[in-house]
Structure formats: C-alpha cells, structure tokens
Amino acid sequence: MPSVNLLGSFSYDHQSVEFFVNREDKAHSAIVEVCCKKMKTQGLKSMTIEFDHSSFIYFLKKGDHIRFIEGNNKDYPVLTSKVRLGLEGDLIPEEDLKEKEETEPKAAATVQVSPPSSDDLDTSLKEDHAIIHHSLYQSLDQFKRNYSNAELYFKPFEEPGGDFYWCRDYQYKSLVALGDCTGHGSLGAMIAMSVMTLLKQFFRLPPTSLKDALVEFHHQMKELMEEEILDTFDVELGVLLLDKRTNILTYSGSGVNMTLKSGDEVNSYRSRKTNIITGKVTEEQIQLKEGDQIFIYSDGILDQFDAKDEKRMGLKGLQQIVTNTHPQNTLSTFLKDFNSFRGKTEQLDDQTMLILTV
Amino acid sequence: MSKDRFGEILDTLQAQHLPSGNVELVEEDEFNDHPFLSGLPFLKSISELQLESEDKYYVITKITDKLFLSISEVKASSNIGILKNISKRISNEIRTAAIKPI
C-alpha cells in the first residue's frame, strides 16, 4: 500500500478541513485550506501541486466537498484513482484507524493492509521490475528478422521507466514502434504496459495508412483512458512500417523523431504530439538501400544537457553525433560521443535509442 | 522583463505547440495578482501545478524561483498529459535561451 501523509476533505459550506490522516512533517497541511478556498473561488474541479518533483497533493471537488491526498509522485495514479473512486478508507493506515476507533464510534468496515518491511519491499520491487521489463521489452533478435542489425541504448531515468520499443512481423511488412510515456519509474512503466496492450491489439493487421492508423490509435487511447479516468496518461510514438518487398520505409510519429543515415547523408524526420490535435499528422516514405541506418529515439536523448549543464543536445547535436558514428560499431561510437557530450550532467528523462541497420 | 526578452520565443513556441491555447510567463512581481499562485505558501518548493476548470486545463511550471511558465488549453483539444509534455518542452527552451547571451 503506498504511503499516505495527508488525507482528508474540505467542506464547501463550513469552510473547514477534516483530516483522516495527518502525518506530514513538512507542514503541508497548512497549504490545504488555502488551496481548497482557491479552488472554490476559481471554480476548479481538480488541482495537483507537485513539490520538488518528488511528492504531490491532489485535490478533487466532489459535490459539496473537496477531497485531498498527499503522497509520492510514483504513487500518483494509485492514490488519485482511490480518491476519485471515494475509497479513502483503503488508504488509512492501521494505527490511525485504531486511534480513530478509540475516539469515534465504529464506522463502516474498512480494508486494512499492513505496510511491508523495507527488505520485503526491496525484493518485491526488484521482482516487479523484472516482470515489467520482461513484458515491455522484446529481444533484439526479433528486430533482426527484418534488419541486418539492431542495437539499443536504453536508460530509464528511474527503473523500470516509461519508454518502450516493440515490433511486429507481418507477411510482407514489418512494424516497429518506439514509445515515450508520461512519467518515469513505475508510473511510466504502468502507462507503457497499457499502451503496449493497446498497440498489440490495434496493429494485429498491417495498417494501410500509417498516419491515419496513428491518429486513430491516439483517438482510441484517449477514449479508453477517459473512460477509466486516466486522462493524465499519455504517450508519444514513432512508428516505422517497412515493406519487405520494396524496401520502402514509412515513418509517422506523434512526438518521437527519427534520423536516417544513408552513406554520408543524415536526415531527420520530426513529428509533434500536437499534430494529433490539430489533425496535421504526416507520414514520410523513404526508399531504403542496404547499409542505411535508422535511429529512432525518445526525447530524453534530445533533452540531455551538456557537460557544463548549459546547452541541450537538440536535433543538431544529435545529427552531428550520428554523422560521426561508425557503421561497424554504431552504438559504441554513438555512446562514446553522447557520453562525452553529457559528461557528469544529470539525466532528466528516460533515454532510448534504437538503431536499425538495413 | 523576462516577457520582453523571451516574447518572440514564446510566440514561436505557442504557434508550434499550442495554437489554440495560451502561453505566458509569470514573473515574481506578478505572483500576488496571479489567480492560482497568489497566497500559496511553500512557493519555493512547488515545482508544478496542474489545474482543471469546467472547460480548460492549466499547467504552471516553475522555471526559476522568480519565474513560472503558465499554459492552458480548452479540454476539447488536449489533456493534462499532453499539456505537461508541452510545458516541459517550453520550459527547457526558455532555460536554454536564458543562458545564451542577449
């Protein structure tokens, strides 16, 4: 059960706050009343405050009350959905319940879960991460069925991470997708698993139009997530469809870019998530030849800052590194330059680079 | 002053990422008049606010202790996940532009 520091509700009529749990040592409880009153005056339905990228307080208006909860960012989907569903009782720690029972008459039955010891949690988390890794990430051998070589750089900001890569082989075509989901760590992985499930179902057959399929996929995902009240979940995708008979590659994306190296020539193909909203999704068709290399990557690569922590790598920086890669050991030469650019500067996002050689 | 300095960049980024939404910088002297930031305690430890009204989503991201980026979009055109990504990108662009000489 995720740790909850603060849990309670605010009455619109009485302008008063009631805490069910208040074990916060940073005195965030002081902010609750201010925020609830602000929500009332501004007519807001929900509010999330993130502190130092590590913890959050979530407020939700339900009828004449505002419910609120504080927890760690990694538990955001679990805790907020509990609040949305009105299952606050699940979140009250056993010791708090005992205190409550002593002072209050018996309330309705509540589910109680004892928190695991830190050793149990450690082992359990590692096992969970291994299972998630196994289900999210395919063997590179599957990519090598249609490409002469496949190499991968995969470095989550926090294990197991929200980036994923996936491929499906059809009779005459091959599909490769690289996704970058909202969030990091377990939250990102949870979204990635949901998106992967949808992808596998959606692309059972090869698409006739890749860009139309991508728009429809996002449309269906949005509908599904809204049904499940998971509208904070999202993904940026880059999709490659290779026609094995003609070696024509079709690329389309919703935020994940691709760079193609053909001989000494390096070209990048960009896409934006907003194109899905504005209806301006495009696709590119490229005639590939033997030895061409496809670099498809999440934005954590482009957003990496340099050794002085002053300049983002950006597309130009990446193109420079790609230009200098050696075709015989592409990944190692890429990483040598990438790590040299980064120095000891902290990584800020999940980073994935998939290199496919025709 | 940041608004003057980054005005052109903001216009470009808005056209690229949020053609039908709103993008603005909120400077320290405007915090007290801002509908969502005014009166908030612990402003220094707040890294982001995500808000939902009847018809709009808002994401307010801290760039520095004295500068926040505020973006909004109507619900029919976006969701919080997309806005968070856009806000991250614009904030990164502003940070990058901030360290370049004027």
Image (spheres, coloured by chain):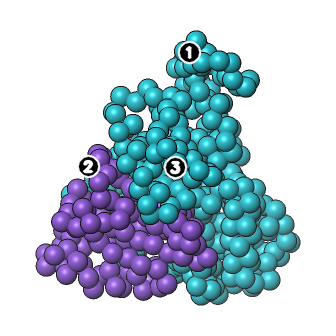
Sequence order check: which comes first, mark 3 or mark 1? 3
For the colour purple, the matching chain is B
Q: Which mark, by number, is residue A12?
A: 3
At mark 3, the secondary structure is loop
The correct choice, above or below, for A282 with respect to A66 in the image is: below
Asked if the residues shown at circle 1 and circle 2 are in contact, with their CB atoms under 8 angstroms apart, the answer is: no
Chain holding disc 3? A
Q: Does residue A8 show up?
A: yes
In this view, the residue in front, A242 or A147, is A242
Compute the Cα span from label 3 to label 1.
25 Å
Question: Marks 2 and 3: same chain?
Answer: no
Chain A colour is: cyan
Q: Farthest residue toward the left?
A: B101
Residue A131 at x, y = what percent? 68, 38
At mark 2, the secondary structure is helix
At mark 1, the secondary structure is helix
Chain holding disc 1? A
Residue A6 at x, y = what percent? 48, 34
Q: Which residue is mark 2?
A: B44
Asked if the residues shown at circle 3 and circle 1 are in contact, with their CB atoms under 8 angstroms apart, the answer is: no
Disc 3 marks which amino acid?
Tyr
Disc 2 marks which amino acid?
Lys
Disc 1 marks which amino acid?
Thr
Chain holding disc 2? B
